[in-house]
Image (cartoon, helix red, strand yellow):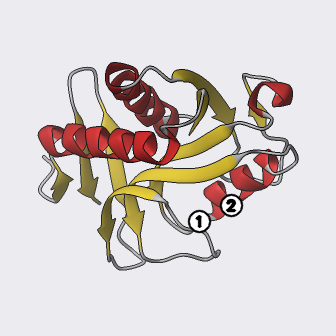
Amino acid sequence: MINNIILSNTDVLNKIRRIAYQIYEVNYEEKEIIIAGIVDNGYFLAQKIVTVLEEISDIKITLCKVKINKKQPLQTIQTDIKPEDYQNKSLVLVDDVLHSGTTLIYAIKHFLDVPIKKFKTAVLVNRNHKKYPVKADFKGISLSTSIREHVIVDFTKNEIIAYLK
């Protein structure tokens, strides 16, 4: 049983909707937005954000899967769209939790090899223990936790919850 729930399913869905509106507000003049989700949970979150963006705007939304080895982020990072597909476009990099910033900063580095018009980051939970100078432009919740605590975002078939472990 999970006792340390940070965000219930309803909370998560509200946070996703708010993040989508914030992304739209920053990009309302764009013709296309690339939403790049870091595998696994970041990509699931990106899919949910894309669904809301498609409901609220007429902007073309392209979903991109970012494959990064979180334990060895220096290994080659792969995306399921070609660099020329996101060149000179607005891109939002999405992950579920910003822990130390390692995954996000290496993923950002990957995208900086191509000129991008606008680059933002989005996370559901932003922890305040960062190893790298990286920030979330759009965040569901900011949370101060101890270094020993871990934030888990659990995407099950019917609901999404975030809790401390």
The one of 21 and 36 positioned closer to us in this rendering: 21
Residue 51 lies left or right of residue 83; in this view the side is: left
**Residue 112, percent across and down?**
81, 51
Q: Quadrant of residue 44?
A: top left
Disc 1: CA contacts within 10 A as few (<14), some (14-19) or many (>=20): many
Residue 42 lies left or right of residue 156; in this view the side is: right
Disc 2: CA contacts within 10 A as few (<14), some (14-19) or many (>=20): some
**Residue 93, percent across and down?**
59, 45
The disc placed on residue 101 is: 1
**Residue 84, percent across and down?**
85, 27
Q: Label 2: which residue?
A: 105
Q: Are marks 1 and 2 in contact (CB under 8 Å)?
A: yes
Residue sitting at the far front = 29
**Numbered disc 2: secondary structure:** helix
The one of 81 and 32 positioned closer to us in this rendering: 32
Name the residue type under label 2: Ile
**Numbered disc 1: secondary structure:** loop
The residue at the point 24 percent across, 54 percent down is 163
The one of 6 and 60 positioned closer to us in this rendering: 60
The one of 27 and 68 positioned closer to us in this rendering: 27
The disc placed on residue 74 is: none
**Residue 62, percent across and down?**
59, 22
Q: CA distance from mark 1 to mark 2?
A: 6 Å
Name the residue type under label 1: Gly
The residue at the point 32 percent across, 77 percent down is 144
The residue at the point 31 percent across, 40 percent down is 16
Residue 59 lies left or right of residue 51; in this view the side is: right
Q: Quadrant of the C terminus?
A: bottom left
The residue at the point 23 percent across, 43 percent down is 12
